[in-house]
Image (cartoon, rainbow, N blue to C red):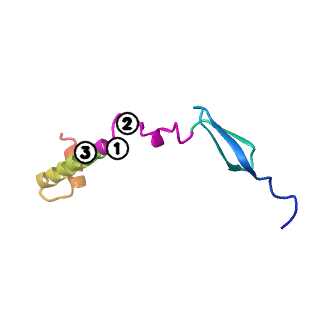
Amino acid sequence: MKPAIHPTYHDDCQVTCACGNKFTTGSTLEKIDLEVCSKCHPFFTGQQKFVDIKGRIDKFKEKQARGVAYKAKLNAMKSASGGKSAATAKKKDTKKVN
């Protein structure tokens, strides 16, 4: 091992959180200041709040409903055109009548 290339390891590193919690750990730093620790983080305290105005599941269900409605419209156009494709039926409907 090469001498003087490794940082000094401190067994008594003092960790201080913004909530006031203090504990000791080992680190290459002498002092660590944290904003959030396991004593004040919502995930660990059980006070986690879900701020989801419109959930992912609701959005997915709406998208699925639009897809089903679109397929029904295409099938209706296809049956109305006598078995031709929906694109052909759509072109036929958009032609101008003199």
User: How many angstroms separate mark 2 from mark 1 (CA)?
Assistant: 9 Å
Residue at 80% across / 54% down in the picture?
7
Residue 6 placement, left or right of 74: right
User: How many angstroms separate mark 3 from mark 1 (CA)?
Assistant: 16 Å
- Please identify the dominant SS of the magenta region: loop
Q: Which residues are magenta?
A: 37-59
Q: Which mark is residue 52?
A: 2
Q: Amino acid at mark 1?
A: Arg
Relative depth, front residue between 59 and 26: 26
Residue at 11% across / 51% down in the picture?
80
Q: Within 10 angstroms of label 1, few (less than 14), some, or many (20 or more) residues?
A: few
Residue 21: horizontal and vertical position, in percent?
59, 36
Q: Which mark is residue 12?
A: none
Judge whether residue 95 can be spotted in this image.
no
Task: Write down the residue under mark 3.
Answer: 66
Relative depth, front residue between 37 and 10: 10
| Labels 3, 1: front one | 1
Residue 6: horizontal and vertical position, in percent?
81, 58
Q: Quadrant of residue 23?
A: top right
Task: Write down the residue under mark 1.
Answer: 56
| Labels 2, 1: front one | 2
Residue 69: horizontal and vertical position, in percent?
20, 46
Relative depth, front residue between 49 and 44: 44
Residue at 30% across / 46% down in the picture?
60
The answer to whether marks 2 and 1 mark residues whose Cβ atoms lie closer than 8 Å is: yes
- Where 47 sits versus 10, above or below? above
Q: Amino acid at mark 3?
A: Arg
Q: Quadrant of residue 56?
A: top left
Quarter in which the C terminus is drawn: top left
